[in-house]
Amino acid sequence: MARINGEEPEAEISPEVSQAVNGYLRDHQNAVRDRLLLKISFDQSGFRRMGNASPEGQLEAREAHALQLINDFPDQPEGYGYLLSLAKGSERLKARRWAEVLLRSQAPEPFKLGAKRVIERLDLEGQKLHLDGVLDGTTKHVDRPLIIYTWTALDEGVRSLVKYLALNWEADFIGINLDTDPSTAKTLAAHLPGVQHYDGGGLDGPLAQELKVITTSSLYLIRNDGTLVDVNGHRDTLSKLAALAKQKEVQK
């Protein structure tokens, strides 16, 4: 099997190496797993050489990589897993498109369940949340938006973000911890804004399921009339909060 040196991100892949790799991949007498792993290694070494490409260009390359794996190795899980990761990490249109591709594919059932949850999560936008013991769907925050954030003891990034927001932005907060053992989380929660709820079941806990959580750290932005407007509030948070504030001013 041809070898790709992943420790040299700036080195160019020679035509001879590319030819050897492609020849190995075309030869179906080679073991499927060997060909698959070489394809992944070869493509990902190319991603490391895309430093000057736009984020959109890099995303397109990763989408093409996942779809090629699905096409060439339909019985192997990696392509489906990569596409699901892209769906989980992307905004509305791309996330929905990739999730729908997975649902139409012959992906193993766990990947289809993940894709279904991605779509269901997006479909929460524009609705009033009903979270048992947290929100009843009629709660209104007349003066300020509500930020619901999910986190675990390992999610330092989202904890730092909500602490910053609490100091610099007018908003109400509700925290939902997803650790199965909340002992450490309860100590950390003393420094976090808002009332805390301990779901206790990771991504499969009752509140996580109602929120259709797909990653442990996330922000949900709720307008002051109680409508959920963004399930990806952890991205471009400040600009999204500014847009909510502008909407409130227009409504006055």
Image (spheres, helix red, strand yellow):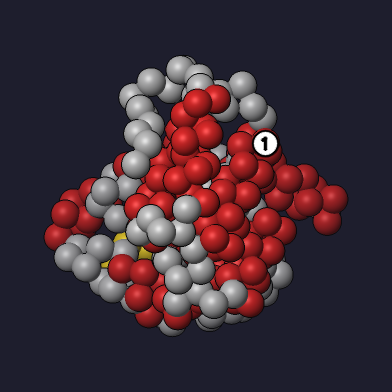
Which of the two residues, 27 or 154, is positioned nearer the viewer here?
27
Residue 209 picture location, percent across and down: 44, 77
The N terminus - image quarter: top left
Residue 36 picture location, percent across and down: 42, 54
Horizontal arrangement in the rendering, residue 179 relative to residue 51 (left or right):
left
Residue depicted at x 52% and y 51%: 26
Task: Please give the count of numbered marks on the rendered protein.
Answer: 1
Which of the two residues, 17 or 68, is positioned nearer the viewer here?
17
Which residue position holds label 1?
57
Is 41 situated above or below 141?
above
Quarter residue 232 falls in: bottom right
Which of the two residues, 158 or 80, is positioned nearer the viewer here?
80
Is 140 situated above or below 246?
below
Residue depicted at x 52% and y 42%: 22
Quarter residue 15 falls in: top right
Which of the two residues, 114 or 92, is positioned nearer the viewer here?
114
Residue 1, visible in the rendered structure: yes
Is 250 situated above or below 52?
below
The C terminus - image quarter: bottom right
Residue 124, visible in the rendered structure: no
- Identity, as a three-letter code, of the amino acid under mark 1: Gly
Residue depicted at x 61% and y 37%: 58
Residue depicted at x 68% and y 38%: 56
